[in-house]
Amino acid sequence: MSATPDLKVVYFPSCINRSMGKNSFQNSDDLQLTALTHQLLVRAGFTIIYPENMYTHCCGMPFSSKGFAEANHAQSEALEKDLLKASENGKYPILYDMSPCFYHSKEEFSKTLKIVDPIEFMLDYVMPQLTIKNKKDTVAVFPVCSVKKIGKMDQLLALSNLCADKVTLIDSNCCGFAGDRGFLVPELNEYGLRELKQQIPANCKEGFSTSRTCEIGLEKMSGIDFKSIFYLIEEVTR
């Protein structure tokens, strides 16, 4: 599908997704998430705009979570400035590929920019432009904490049900990875997901979410392939 003139989006790939590679279940032919997202948006007919100085940007959350308020605000302000320019002062929507980053910017930014959570963007903007060709039989889906905070649970389920006949919504207060805490204190992740395996049906081999670090913990604790829901959408509409 060729790009449609009125379908434009500013895509901000999170610094985590830019810097982290594929998971242990993926092979050399699989695209890294930011490249896959670009391909998916193009297939849906979007013209993609990237912010200037993209590789210098971060939403600021890693600094905020560790108490570095000044660094957080500096990063957030710099990102907002370049997103404002890229979107022509809010004319075009801005896609975030991680829910926690979206939530942080939503709290930090002014009201001018139309930043959009990955779940909402895929459900409302992308799926209407695509055709489901090979729906999955069964998948597991995990709503990260920010998804619960911003009330996207129903949208996550609706999006997943478009792509699979049976969707298991994983129930957990928090996966325990908590940004990067799971790297430093793996016991938090182990405890947070202590009931994960028993929730996943025996015939379910894939899980999806909207936060890379949470997906790392989910993969480790479940033993199945856990990655961004963008991979699910790309595969079933390919």
Image (tube, rainbow, N blue to C red):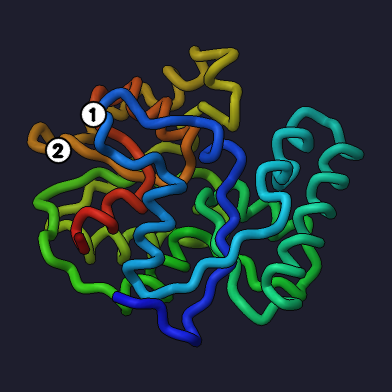
| Quadrant location of the N terminus in the rendered image | bottom left
Q: Residue at x 67, y 72 (%)?
A: 87
Q: Is residue 176 found left or right of 170 in the rendered image?
A: right
Q: Which amino acid does label 1 sit on?
A: Ile
Q: Residues within 10 Å of mark 2 (few under 14, many from 20)?
A: some
Q: Earlier in the sequence, mark 2 or mark 1?
A: 2
| Along the line of sight, the residue nearer the viewer: 152 or 111 | 111
Q: Residue at x 44, y 61 (%)?
A: 119
Indicate whether 176 appears above or below 154. Answer: above
Q: How crowded is mark 1: few (under 14 residues within 10 Å), some or many (20 or more)?
A: some
Q: Residue at x 70, y 43 (%)?
A: 58
- The residue to which callout 2 is attached is 204
| Quadrant location of the C terminus in the rendered image | bottom left
- The residue to which callout 1 is attached is 224
Which type of secondary structure does the marked residue at label 1 adopt? loop
User: Hey, which quadrant is residue 181 in on the image?
Assistant: top right
Q: Position of residue 89 (x, y in %)?
A: 75, 77
| Along the line of sight, the residue nearer the viewer: 58 or 141 | 58
Whether pointer 2 and pointer 1 mark residues with C-beta atoms closer than 8 Å, the reply is: yes
User: Hey, which quadrant is residue 150 in on the image?
Assistant: bottom right
